[in-house]
Amino acid sequence: MLRLFVTGTTSRSQRAIANMRKICEKELAGQYDLEIIDVYEKPEATRELQVVATPTLVKVLPEPLRRIIGDLSDREKVLTGLNLTPVTGEPRQIS
C-alpha cells in the first residue's frame, strides 16, 4: 500500500501525483494500491505516519515502512526507495 501526501492542487502536488501514477503503471502494472491524501482535507493523516513535508510518498505495506519526499520525478530514486529495480519483463509486487 502506497500513500502519497500532497498539499492541495498545486503544480508540485499535481506533478508528484502524475509521476507516481506513471511509475506505478509502468513498474507495478495494476498490482498496487495508491492512495492520494490531501493534507488540507485530512490533516490528521499526517500525524499517524509522521509526515512533515509534502509531497511525501509512504510505502506502508509490505513492511518496512519507507518514505520518499519530493516531486517523485527521479524514477531511480523512487524505485530504490521502494526497494524495486526497473522492470525488465513481467510486473511485480512491491517488496
Image: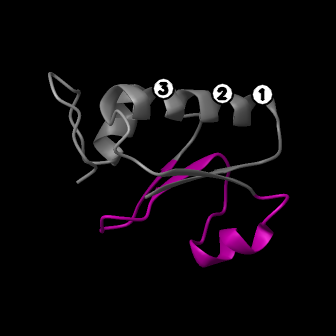
Near mark 2 (Cα within 10 A), the count class, few <14, some 14-19 or many ≥20, is some
Quarter that holds the N terminus: bottom left
Secondary structure state at the residue bearing disc 3: helix
The amino acid on which the numbered mark 2 sits, given as a three-letter code, is Arg
Secondary structure state at the residue bearing disc 2: helix
Distance between the Cα atoms at labels 3 and 2? 11 Å
The amino acid on which the numbered mark 3 sits, given as a three-letter code, is Lys
**Residue 72 marker:** none
**Residue furthest top as drawn:** 88
Q: Residue at x 23, y 27 (%)?
A: 86
**Which residue is the site of mark 1?**
11
**Which residue is the site of mark 2?**
15
Distance between the Cα atoms at labels 3 and 1? 16 Å
For the residue pair 35 and 5, the one nearer the viewer reads as 35
The amino acid on which the numbered mark 1 sits, given as a three-letter code, is Ser
Secondary structure state at the residue bearing disc 1: helix
Tell me: 66 left or right of 21.
Answer: left
Segment colored magenta: 39-68
Nearer the viewer's eye, disc 3 or disc 1?
3
Q: Residue 13: percent from the left, percent from the top?
A: 72, 37
Q: Is residue 24 magenta?
A: no
Distance between the Cα atoms at labels 2 and 1? 6 Å
Q: Is residue 53 magenta?
A: yes
Nearer the viewer's eye, disc 3 or disc 2?
3
Q: Mark 1 and mark 2 in contact (Cβ < 8 Å)?
A: yes
Q: Residue at x 33, y 48 (%)?
A: 82
Q: Residue 64: percent from the left, percent from the top?
A: 30, 68
Q: Residue 23: percent from the left, percent from the top?
A: 42, 29
**Residue 22 marker:** 3
